[in-house]
């Protein structure tokens, strides 16, 4: 059935951006294993060179930026112009998740009050909003982020994060998260309630922290917090549903002296605050890469000195499988999450291992020397690598491999190649096909294809006759094999401990390891779905209030105590008493002389309001 679906699916397409302009190339057909035709799409016409190229998430539109003149939005099938805007000086561009808006950044102009961060309507080319944004850094782009459905939008400010209506940013803010010294933030994927994570670096002996807030909930109180030392900067990586966050920390200097490049750390935080832990690494050392499975089942981490360990974790950050030790530093999941490429690019030799996630079996290996860019096709059947300018000024070109490492099935050289991107596709465009059976005698590693032109052998370095290759053999021996792991051996410490990662350890009697939270029961899942529906209604109500309109749906209005049933009142009182119990515990800590964090101090200020609400409901 999957094969039939594949034969009906549209052919994949990838785009090359080079000195000569934009080339659209037809990818190999998803349904055929015999026919390998990669040829130029002559119907796509976009004359002229481009400095930037970005696709919408569904792949229907592509924006081409020419820094000297402006940007053009084109249909990715034909190249037809949708909108063209003259606005010279653009150095960065990003799409909103649904492709309705574009965000551009240009250098601030002296003696000008006009904002240099601009939001555009992607259909009309009209300007929606402008903001002042001093500098551009690649790892913090974009500085304005939408929720997946574009209902809300967030922008970092001097004292926190400002929230806007995602469909009407120019109308003004709908809320603000006040948190001084914010250095980074990230909006989670997924539906309401919308989650925003904020990072504050350590300062004057105070630990760094990541706090998660939810809209339209109380923006004064975070739903989850993780504090730690040794963190000058972080990368925030949300799970595909926004239910959990991986925090990758970095410092410029390694105080232990083990690395020239500073220290790294890895933390896991559930967005509801129910669970957090230090991600237990199977090999201590630098974290090279971490990437979530697109299905949300877990994530893969590559860490440690070379040969580094690649490890698969479940969605509670417990290791379940080790792919082995090898010179690898990049994790790349196929769009369906079925296949996985572990690669060693950059200063490594370009080896790639391809794995089947469900069976945890290695399908094959390949090598792509000097690769600077890599990408999966949207049907998860092909993997492309490219050597691009200006990272490397010679041997520019691209190679295409099958999902199992067979190939290259096609390779071409280019004079100056700047970028290679597969055109994305909507989620259900291509079926999630399993690995195809191998033909008899087919090599599992470096497959061959008559379609791939054979490169001339490169000159080899002189090797003395008595050279034994002992060093190379020893290095190969260091590369370990794969194995399943017992997740219980790596159970993370309880989040209730008062120790902060990076600080001096302090033993607390009776506080051992705790297992990760259990799977939700049917009733709990039902309750969660109901809460999500209530959150969506609350978001609409909040947006309606900002727009000056009353909510049209009667269900969006919260019932007053007089309208609530006795059962609803009892349930509400129970929840309030639970919060008051937590406050009592915080007060006891304070009386014992323990230091309190900002969240605990904030909770103490809500005590009287909670007691008043209990009194009203109990009357």
Image (spheres, rainbow, N blue to C red):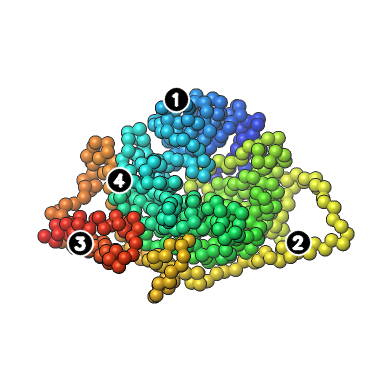
Number of numbered markers:
4
Callout 2: few (<14), some (14-19), or many (20+) C-alpha neighbours within 10 Å? few
Query: Where residue 356 appears, x then y in whole percent?
Result: 59, 59
Q: CA distance from mark 4 to mark 1?
A: 40 Å
Q: Mark 2 vs mark 3: which is more N-terminal?
A: 2
Q: CA distance from mark 4 to mark 3?
A: 24 Å
Query: Where residue 571 appears, x then y in whole percent?
Result: 22, 62
Residue at coordinates 73% horizontally, 52% vertically from top-left? 448
Callout 4: few (<14), some (14-19), or many (20+) C-alpha neighbours within 10 Å? many
Mark 4 lies on a secondary structure that is helix
Residue at coordinates 71% horizontally, 55% vertically from top-left? 446
**Which residue carries the number 4 mark?**
539
Residue 483 vs residue 249, the one in the foreground: 249
**Which residue carries the number 3 mark?**
573
Q: Mark 3 vs mark 1: which is more N-terminal?
A: 1
Q: Mark 1 vs mark 2: which is more N-terminal?
A: 1
**Which residue carries the number 1 mark?**
111
Mark 1 lies on a secondary structure that is loop
**Which residue carries the number 2 mark?**
472
Q: Quadrant of residue 310?
A: bottom right
């Amino acid at each position: 059935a999957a094969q039939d679906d594949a034969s009906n699916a549209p052919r994949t397409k990838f785009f090359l951006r080079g000195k000569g302009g934009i080339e659209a190339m037809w990818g190999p057909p998803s349904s055929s294993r015999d026919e390998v035709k990669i040829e130029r799409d002559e119907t796509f016409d976009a004359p002229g060179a481009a400095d930037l190229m970005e696709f919408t998430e569904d792949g229907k539109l592509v924006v081409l930026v020419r820094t000297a003149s402006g940007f053009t939005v084109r249909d990715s099938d034909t190249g037809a112009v949708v909108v063209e805007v003259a606005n010279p000086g653009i150095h960065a561009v990003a799409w909103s998740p649904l492709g309705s808006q574009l965000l551009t950044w240009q250098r601030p102009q002296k003696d000008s009050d006009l904002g240099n961060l601009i939001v555009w309507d992607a259909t009309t080319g009209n300007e929606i909003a402008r903001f002042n944004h001093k500098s551009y850094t690649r790892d913090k782009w974009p500085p304005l982020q939408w929720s997946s459905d574009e209902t809300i939008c967030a922008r970092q400010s001097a004292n926190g994060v400002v929230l806007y209506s995602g469909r009407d940013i120019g109308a003004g803010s709908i809320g603000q998260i006040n948190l001084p010294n914010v250095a980074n933030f990230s909006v989670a994927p997924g539906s309401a309630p919308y989650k925003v994570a904020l990072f504050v670096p350590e300062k004057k002996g105070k630990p760094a922290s990541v706090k998660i807030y939810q809209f339209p909930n109380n923006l004064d109180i975070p739903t989850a917090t993780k504090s730690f030392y040794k963190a000058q900067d972080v990368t925030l990586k949300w799970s595909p549903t926004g239910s959990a966050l991986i925090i990758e920390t970095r410092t410029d200097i390694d105080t232990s002296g083990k690395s020239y490049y500073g220290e790294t750390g890895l933390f896991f935080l559930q967005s509801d605050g129910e669970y957090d832990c230090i991600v237990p690494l199977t090999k201590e050392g630098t974290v090279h890469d971490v990437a979530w499975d697109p299905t949300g089942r877990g994530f893969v981490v590559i860490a440690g000195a070379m040969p580094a360990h690649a490890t698969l974790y479940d969605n509670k950050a417990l290791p379940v499988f080790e792919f082995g030790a090898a010179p690898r530093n990049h994790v790349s999941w196929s769009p369906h999450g079925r296949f996985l490429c572990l690669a060693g690019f950059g200063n490594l030799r370009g080896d790639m291992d391809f794995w089947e996630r469900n069976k945890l079996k290695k399908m094959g290996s390949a090598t792509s020397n000097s690769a600077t860019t890599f990408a999966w096709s949207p049907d998860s059947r092909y993997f492309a690598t490219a050597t691009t300018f200006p990272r490397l000024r010679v041997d520019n070109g691209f190679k295409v491999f099958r999902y199992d490492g067979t190939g290259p099935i096609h390779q071409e050289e280019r004079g100056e190649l700047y970028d290679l991107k597969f055109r994305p596709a909507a989620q259900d465009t291509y079926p999630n096909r399993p690995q195809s059976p191998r033909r008899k005698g087919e090599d599992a590693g470096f497959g061959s294809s008559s379609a791939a032109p054979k490169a001339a052998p490169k000159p080899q370095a002189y090797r003395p006759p008595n050279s034994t290759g002992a060093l190379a053999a020893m290095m190969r021996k260091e590369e370990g094999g794969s194995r399943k792991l017992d997740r219980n051996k790596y159970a993370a410490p309880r989040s209730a401990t008062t120790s902060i990662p990076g600080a001096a350890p302090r033993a607390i009697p009776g506080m051992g390891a705790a297992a990760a939270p259990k799977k939700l029961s049917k009733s709990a899942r039902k309750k969660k779905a109901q809460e999500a529906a209530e959150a969506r209604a609350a978001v609409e109500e909040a947006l309606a209030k900002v727009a000056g309109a009353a909510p049209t749906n009667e269900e969006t209005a919260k019932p007053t105590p007089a309208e609530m049933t006795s059962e609803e009142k009892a349930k509400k009182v129970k929840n309030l008493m639970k919060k008051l119990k937590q406050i009592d515990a915080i007060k006891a800590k304070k009386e014992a002389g323990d230091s309190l964090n900002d969240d605990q101090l904030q909770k103490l200020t809500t005590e009287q309001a909670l007691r008043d609400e209990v009194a009203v409901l109990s009357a």
